[in-house]
Amino acid sequence: MSSKIVNILSNANFESKKTASALQDELKKHGYKPFNGFNKNAELCVCIGGDGSFIKAVHRNNFPEMPFVGINTGHLGFYQEIKPNEIVKFVTDYKNNNYEVQDIKILRTDIYTKNKVYKLNAINEVVLKAAHSKTIHMNVFIDRNHVEKFSGDGILVSTPSGSTAYNFSTGGSIVYPTLHVLQMTPISPVSSSAYRSIRSSLIVPGGHTISLVIEKRYKDSNLLLVDGNEYFFNNLHRVNTRLSNKTIKKLIFSNNSYWDNIKDKFL
Ligand code: NAD
């Protein structure tokens, strides 16, 4: 049975707070119990803000099982589908089960250091770079097959949903969110007679593991970006990334909004 509890996770913008208050009133009218913050027994998380608010909400609450829906008060949102003036329709549609559930694929990254393996999840991307803006050299394996020796700014591995974020800015392709694939995109690859790196992005089956093995001299001077958050590891040897078995569930109210977003954001 549904708990009727609906989490409201809002950023601190005036527009977001106003929207949160209007949403609370509307939910109460329909017999729901709005909760400001994260309640693990909630049946839904409504995230108010831009894409960044959605990403933070998922990370802070440890990639929860319950579905998400986003109300966009920021710049154009890829994860935030509902507009603030659509709250009444949204609550009615939700109550009448007038929506679909989309699985947002996430990355599972295992970070191998000398003494410990760290595990991180990402919604958009994982990027391995050298610290202090140096060129990084690493060997790239896909499912244990050696693919290249890479030299350049770094390598970005993105989810299908993340393909329109940093990946797109680095020249990667847009991948429809339901496809079960990973994308590996080089950032400023060096291509000279001394170093040859693949210049285009690679689309890799979701079940395969992309393994980045950095040269020893970067073991203590690397930077790992996970959805925009920075991590530094000592004694780093290898970063393995694949699609996780886990997903984030997102409610979809209009099938066309993805292509509308692409057109509005990039054209
Ligand atoms: P932020 O809120 O400043 O977000 C940066 C921009 O990325 C925003 O315009 C946001 O709408 C957009 N964005 C985020 N996810 C998106 C997606 N899946 N599709 C299309 N656009 C998307 O910064 P943040 O909150 O820390 O967000 C982190 C994200 O910022 C990272 O995951 C990364 O993808 C992105 N980023 C982009 C660049 C770049 O384009 N050069 C550089 C660094 C980080």
Image: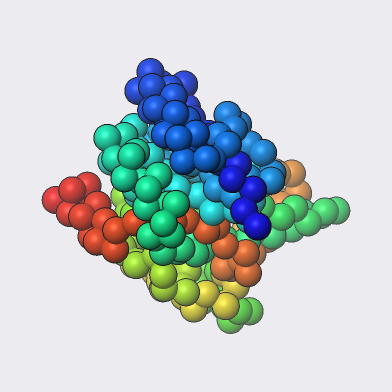
Q: Is residue 225 left or right of residue 52?
A: right
Q: Is residue 117 left or right of residue 150?
A: right
Q: Position of residue 156 (x, y in %)?
A: 47, 56
In the rendered image, the residue lying farthest to the left is: 267
| Residue at 75% in and 53% down | 118
Above-or-below relation of 71 to 66: above
Q: Is residue 24 left or right of residue 120?
A: left
| Residue at 41% in and 73% down | 179
Q: Visible in this render: residue 140? A: yes
Q: Position of residue 235 (x, y in %)?
A: 76, 49
Above-or-below relation of 192 to 76: below
Q: What colour scheme governs how the chains and residues are painted in the rendered image of this protein?
A: rainbow
In the rendered image, the residue lying farthest to the right is: 115
Q: Position of residue 242 (x, y in %)?
A: 59, 68
Q: Quadrant of residue 171?
A: bottom left
Q: Is residue 251 left or right of residue 259?
A: right
* Callout count: 0
Name the one closer to the observer, 239 or 105. Answer: 105
Name the one closer to the observer, 44 or 157. Answer: 44
Q: Position of residue 149 (x, y in %)?
A: 52, 68
| Residue at 29% in and 63% down | 255
Name the one closer to the observer, 23 or 179. Answer: 23
Above-or-below relation of 103 to 37: below
| Residue at 45% in and 35% down | 29
Q: Quadrant of residue 187?
A: bottom left
Q: Quadrant of the N terminus?
A: bottom right
Q: Visible in this render: residue 60? A: no
